Image (tube, coloured by chain):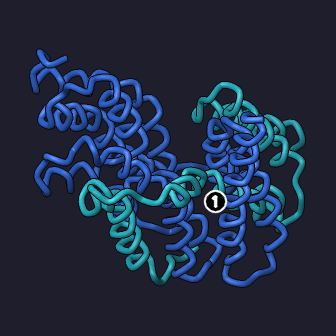
Chain colours: A blue, B cyan
Amino acid sequence: MSTTTTKSSFWQGFRDGLPFILVIAPFSALFGVVATEAGLNVIEVLLFSVVVIAGAAQFTAIQLMMDNTPTVIVIASALAVNLRMAIYSASLAPYLREAKTWQRALVAYGTVDQSYALSAAKYEAEPDMTTRQRLAYFSGCLVPVLPLWYGFTVVGALGGKAVPDALALDFAVPLTFLAMIGPMLRTLPHVTAALVSIAAALGFAWVPFNLGLLIAAFLAMVMAVQCESWLERRQKT
Amino acid sequence: MSEHPDLWLIIVALGLGSFGLRFMFTGLLGNWAMPTIILRHLRYAAVAVLPGLVAPLVLWPSATDGQIDPARLTAAVVTLAVAMIFKRVLLGILTGAGTLFLILYLVA
């Protein structure tokens, strides 16, 4: 819609981002609790959330740090979880060519699952949007999400010390990961990736420095694409 | 437990790395198309890492010194199933945690 103003694009983004509050707040509070249990203080936990803003990668890093994994492997594994951000970046790039570098840098910082999913859908549905409107919509999506992500990490970090041991918090991270994996299993190649990843991670558990996980991830990606190609070939014939 | 000695290095490296991944195309390589074959593989990165990360945690939980624990295993299955069927992350965590507490309470 070429009639949409920059201001209304912002508010559209804001409204579209609002429902994510329900997910973001408890999720980031849980990170605060878990990171505090792992020995981080409030400032460290908050910085983690401000600098990295990627739940899955943050949980991955904390879990591996608790297992005393070497630093390089912690970083490599958490970044591997975040590789999807490069895809988001590639997919948003054509829409933001005319934006200034600092604007694109801000978009890059704020590229998270929610802002990406909303914006990519919006840009595709309304190709007539101006660059200003696109940027406004993107910032609108982030306004309900980012402050809560920061804030509830602190709430979790402060409240975490009050959580009694009986609550079996040791299992909070595995359950969180499993719940994140569930919706990812949309297609056969995704299920293949998950199964190969599990089998290889268990099979290579003896490899030192948790390197088995990276081997498993590599094999899982290769097998998923193989499965995808196989499905395509089968469809054609 | 005590703090990881390289905590700050990890935070900084993850921050720079995550920003780099996000800025790679929007900022630096806007006009360069990544080879399709790499893009296809990257789409599966998250679902290739997370299951492998979680599998040993579920099978050999630290709380039971690496022994298979029926309560935690059941909770894990419930969480995954609920999250997969309803596509709701939070609902999965809550039902899974509820299952775990219920079983631990009943057994104790």
Q: Is residue A58 visible?
A: no
Residue at the outermost front position: A237
Amino acid type of the residue that numbered disc 1 sits on in the rendered structure: Val
Residue at point 28%, 38% (across, down):
A142
In which quarter of the view is residue A25 placed?
top left
Most foreground residue, B80 or A234? A234
Q: Secondary structure at mark 1?
A: helix
Most foreground residue, A136 or A62? A136
Q: Is residue A3 left or right of residue B87?
A: left
In which quarter of the view is residue B41 placed?
bottom right
Residue at point 29%, 48% (across, down):
A93
Q: Is residue B96 visible?
A: yes
Chain ID for label 1?
Answer: B
Q: Is residue B102 above or below residue B3?
A: above
Residue at point 55%, 58% (across, down):
B37
In which quarter of the view is residue A44 placed?
bottom left
What is the x, y in percent for residue A185? 68, 39
What is the x, y in percent for residue A175? 67, 46
Q: Is residue A202 above or below residue B77?
A: below
Q: Is residue A160 left or right of residue A164?
A: left
Residue at mark 1: B49
Locate the N terminus of chain B and report the quarter of the image it occupies.
bottom right
Q: Is residue A142 left or right of residue A169?
A: left
What is the x, y in percent for residue A121? 38, 29
Q: Residues within 10 Å of mark 1 (few under 14, many from 20)?
A: many
Locate the C terminus of chain B and report the quarter of the image it occupies.
top right
What is the x, y in percent for residue B12? 35, 73
Residue at point 82%, 66% (across, down):
A202
Number of numbered discs on residues = 1
Q: Is residue B81 above or below residue B39?
A: above
